[in-house]
Amino acid sequence: TAIITGFIVIIHLDKVTPMRKFWRAMFGNGSIGELIILTLLTLMWGVTTWFNTSIRGPAGEGNDQFNLYFTSWLCLWCSFWTLERWCTASGWSSFTSFVLSWPNRCPLWIVVEIMSLADFLFALDAVRNWSDGTKDTPYANKMFSDVSNGEWQLLLWSSAGTFAISLSWTLVEIFRENKINKNNKKSDVETYVEGLSLLLLTLIWIITVFLTTIPGGAASLVGNLYFCGWGTLLSVVAANLWWVRDWREGIRKILETERADYDSIKRAIRSKALRERERRINAARNEDQLGDLESSDDVPDDTAIIRARTL
């Protein structure tokens, strides 16, 4: 990676050689050659990070190779970030824009899905290979040997169940009928079921993270299990807070609608009362005018009396 990226940096600085136009076309916006290089680097670092940071890797739990652990993940992130920048500069849809384009709370469900799947894979690898991966670190081997089978099952079933639930809610957004419901609005039943799902997952992951990250727990050492466990919990809590915010926003809109209806009815009643009051005042004025005419010295003829009553 250092050789490839160093050579590419030197190429970008080329201003004098006959190849400068070729390099410009090779690494310009929308260049397929640059896309292939970035994709290969991202895939390569994805595989490398797995082997480096898994339980049997040189930077796995208990090996205390923190520089190798964090630089492996950093190289993967840099490769993926550069690929994202290429997509943005080329007018393509990046992974970030793809996730954010989903309606409702689906973007966070996708994050929960990714985190829980990663946690399940790392937990499955750890429970199967911790004996081989920690044979050179006696304290880590002793710690993993003391972890109960129930704790491993809790971690595995929590991550697997979370992945299944998050995948289900992602599929709900895919298969929702949009011909009539163009705004992808959830029904009240679906909203409440989603809220119960998030509340249940939050409680499960609070318990799981508490039990597995305390000293002597399956995910107590700095490594993939530790970070994925906390990442899954935080993403579930974030989705739950998003649901609560939307729920309160829905209540606010309902209250505003009812308040608007109440104000409309109140204005109608007040307008009707004012019209009735004006009618009564006009009628009283007409009666007063008629009384004045009947009590005057000049006796009006029938035409005047009729006109006064009409007024």
Image (cartoon, rainbow, N blue to C red):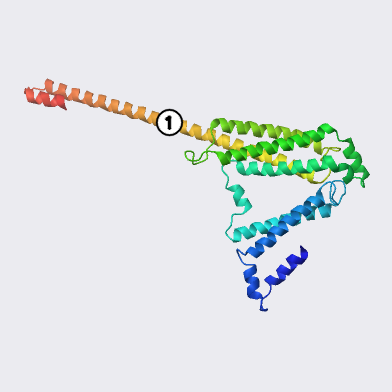
Answer few, some or many: residues within 10 Å of disc 1's Cα (few below 14, many 20 plus, some between 14 and 19).
few
Q: In which quarter of the image is residue 91?
A: bottom right
Left/right of residue 108 with respect to residue 222 in the rendered view: left
Q: Is mark 1 on a helix, strand or loop?
A: helix
The spot of residue 153 in percent (x, y) is 79, 34
Left/right of residue 72 with respect to residue 98 in the rendered view: right
Q: In which quarter of the image is residue 288?
A: top left
According to the image, label 1 marks what residue?
A: 261
Q: Is residue 95 above or below residue 119?
A: below
Q: Quadrant of the C terminus?
A: top left
Q: 300 or 9: nearer the eye?
A: 9
Give the residue displayed 62% in from the left and 33% down from the top. Answer: 195
Q: In this view, does 199 lie above or below 293?
A: below
Left/right of residue 255 with respect to residue 121 in the rendered view: left
Give the residue displayed 87% in from the left and 39% down from the top. Answer: 144
Give the residue displayed 92% in from the left and 45% down from the top. Answer: 135
The spot of residue 236 in percent (x, y) is 68, 39
Please state the total of marks drawn on the protein image.
Answer: 1
Q: In which quarter of the image is residue 9?
A: bottom right
Disc 1 marks a residue whose amino acid type is: Asp
Q: In this view, does 148 lie above or below 39?
A: above
Q: In which quarter of the image is the N terminus?
A: bottom right
Q: 220 or 277: nearer the eye?
A: 220
The spot of residue 223 in percent (x, y) is 81, 46
- Residue 220 shows in the view: no
Q: 168 or 263: nearer the eye?
A: 168
Give the residue displayed 82% in from the left and 42% down from the top. Answer: 126
The spot of residue 176 in percent (x, y) is 54, 38
Q: 257 or 115: nearer the eye?
A: 115
Left/right of residue 281 with respect to residue 48 in the rendered view: left
